[in-house]
Image (cartoon, helix red, strand yellow):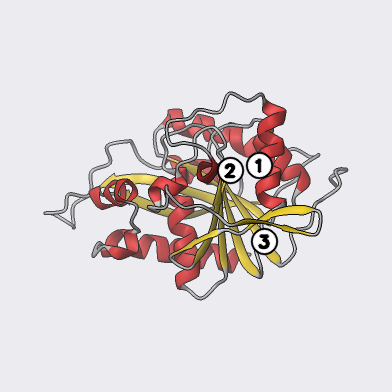
Amino acid sequence: MSVFEKVTLEGVKNIIVVASGKGGVGKSTVSANLAISLARNGYKTALVDADIFGPSIPKMLGIENANPEVTHLGDKEVMFPVEKYGVKIMSIGFFIKKNQGLIWRGPMAANAIMQLFENTVWGDIDYMVVDFPPGTSDIQLTTVQKLQITGAIIVTTPQEVAVNDARKAASMFNNPDLNVPILGVVENMTWFTPATHPDEKYFIFGKNGGEVLSQELRTKLLGQIPLVAEVSECSDNGSSIFNTNNELVINAFEKLTNTIVDSI
């Protein structure tokens, strides 16, 4: 049992953290489209960009120039999240310049992330998706110590290098002092499918990495997301994969969403 005093986020029922051991595996892509998919299925959804040093959610959702409303409630300064695709979104990226790097030590970053959680007026939320930075640092540790986490999702790609790092990320949640349930593993970029040959699969990053990891962790393989051009194009253009006609990816995220909801 955790000995840390927990912070209650009023109105928030479930907090799902999305983690990875290394960058570049599509963790933010999974976080953003999972949140959008949850909202599309009728759930009141929030998305927190917890990557203080490399916030990517504003760019991925086309809201880089958004300015969250900041006001005072009594003696407390509070913020209201930006809303898009039916999702309430908060990121440190809203408060810094696009080309500005934060030169902060770990405790400063950990304090900043807790302000995003605690000082934001969320309203009623069924599922809050938290896009963690890669690795196991102060931000991740502070979040799981301070908040009542419903469960964690581990994102990896099939190759062994990514799986090795994902194991390390998972070990944090399994620490007896933290004891955060791992809901399962999402394998991203499972295979490549050319747009002109939608029935073909090319396993360019290897095979079965996510399945092996889920078996090691004694958890579920929640889903496998194919590598298609539309996913990266949507991220660059600030759009959603649900605005495309690629049923392969849309169905993958719909299945992932249903599996997670059923697990919880």
Return the mark for residue 113: 1
Query: Mark 1 or 3, which is nearer the eye?
Result: 3
SS for dot 2: loop
The residue lying at 77 percent from left, 43 percent from top is 145
Q: Position of residue 192 (x, y in %)?
A: 25, 45
Return the mark for residue 28: none
Query: Mark 3 or 2, which is nearer the eye?
Result: 3
Cα–Cα gap, marks 2 and 1: 6 Å
Kind of residue at disc 1: Ile
Q: Given contact means CB atoms under 8 Å apart, are the residues at marks 2 and 1 in contact?
A: yes
Q: Given contact means CB atoms under 8 Å apart, are the residues at marks 3 and 2 in contact?
A: no
75 horizontally vs 83: left or right = right
Residue 187 seen: no
Q: Given contact means CB atoms under 8 Å apart, are the residues at marks 1 and 3 in contact?
A: no
Q: Position of residue 154 (x, y in %)?
A: 54, 45
The local crowd at label 3, few if under 14, some if 14 to 19, many if 20 or more residues have their Cα within 10 Å, is some
The residue lying at 49 percent from left, 60 percent from top is 35
The residue lying at 57 percent from left, 31 percent from top is 135
The local crowd at label 2, few if under 14, some if 14 to 19, many if 20 or more residues have their Cα within 10 Å, is many
Kind of residue at disc 2: Ala
Cα–Cα gap, marks 3 and 2: 17 Å
SS for dot 1: helix
Task: Name the residue beneath numbered marker 3.
Answer: 121
Residue 180 seen: yes
Kind of residue at disc 3: Val
Q: Position of residue 22 (x, y in %)?
A: 49, 31
47 horizontally vs 4: left or right = left
Cα–Cα gap, marks 1 and 3: 15 Å
Return the mark for residue 50: 2
The first of marks 2 and 1 along the sequence is 2
